[in-house]
Image: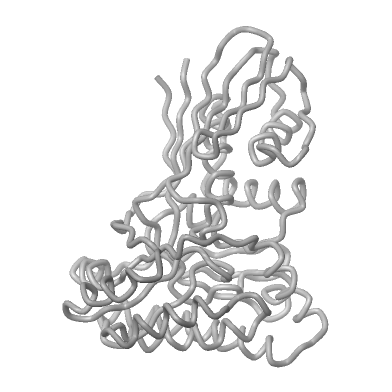
Amino acid sequence: MIHRSKAPLRIGLAGGGTDVSPYCDEFGGAILNATISLNANATIEITGDNRIVLEAFDRDEKEVFDWSEQLLLNGHLDLLKGVYNRIQKDYPFQKTGFKLSTYVDAPAGSGLGTSSTLVVAIVGAFAEMLQLPLGEYDIAHYAYDIERNDLKLAGGRQDQYAATFGGVNFMEFYKDDKVIVNPLRIRQRYLDELENNLLLYYTSTSRESAKIIEEQSKNVTEKKQTSIDAMHELKHQAQMMKEALLKGQLHEIGHILNIGFEQKRKMAAGINNALIDDIYNAAKASGATGGKISGAGGGGFMIFYCPGNTKYKVQQALDKFGGVNRNYQFTKHGLKTWSV
């Protein structure tokens, strides 16, 4: 028997960083994001022997173990081990050999929520195998709890919920891990135009988001007003983006993105750097009206709003930086699971 799952990666359009504690616990956070046609994939194959095989095809990593109820976390394939350990603890299943294999359509540390989306996909594959009665909120929170509490990885909350629910969502975050997902009913022609005009650009660099997020959290804890005020502005940016998309005021998207770009760099050191500035300025000089760094910042993907047909000139302008323009489509589905 084979059990499969896939969960979509996401583009964060506004409010990024306000889903991170302690900011959202104290002030409440808000983010607008949209899932895209790049996925994290997980497959569990029942082998019937006494071995556990873990393999990440995109990372070219593989480990093989004799059957054990808990696997040692050692920095290799820890996301896979962490989910297995938690599932085995909460929903212990009979001793049977299996192979868990994964593949993610974007590099780790690229800012599209790869790690959290992969955790959601793995949880989904086990839920499919064991027929666990978990709803969307359950799976998203379970994945979040594994990452933040079991694996001690710093980060926000949006990625797990985006991957599980899918589509374009306005999300609200509060203390005690309370999350409210509000799906947005955006006219299809507005989404089509946004998809056409929004350029997804991979800088061919990655970063360790945990360090940036840890500093961002520290700035809030230490009451650094510049960082806190920037997060307030980013939360307001999410409201502005929601209104612009629902009303079809797409001409405002670039300006709203630009607000986020200017405010995000104030949250923590390392979010911005000279390369990002050069790329951003080149894109705007070629016709983009605004853009942002995806995820925690420091590298990875950037997005640019290019009205009319300006995206072709923007693409040409960015060629000299050695990055890659990535094709995508918005998706309406979240986590999918099935067995064969």
Against 80, is 21 above or below? Answer: below
Image quarter (top left, top right, bottom left or bottom right) of the C terminus: top left
Q: Is residue 89 left or right of residue 238?
A: right
**Residue found at x 68% / y 68%:** 213
Relative to 194, say whether 36 is above or below. Answer: above
Point 32% across, 86% down: residue: 289
Residue 117 to residue 4: above or below: below
228 shown above or below 23: below
Residue 254, percent from left and from top:
34, 84
**Furthest-top residue in this view:** 49
Query: Which quadrant of the structure image shows residue 339?
Result: top left
Tally of marks: 0
Tell which of 188 and 193 is nearer to you.
193
Q: How is the image coloured?
A: one colour
Residue 112, image x, y percentages: 48, 59
Q: Residue at horizontal 52%, vertical 34%? A: 102
> How far across and down, in percent of the image, does residue 146 sit?
70, 46
Where residue 94 sits, quadrant-wise, is top right
Drawn side of residue 113 relative to residue 339, left or right: right
Image quadrant of residue 95? top right
Which residue is the extreme one toward the right?
222
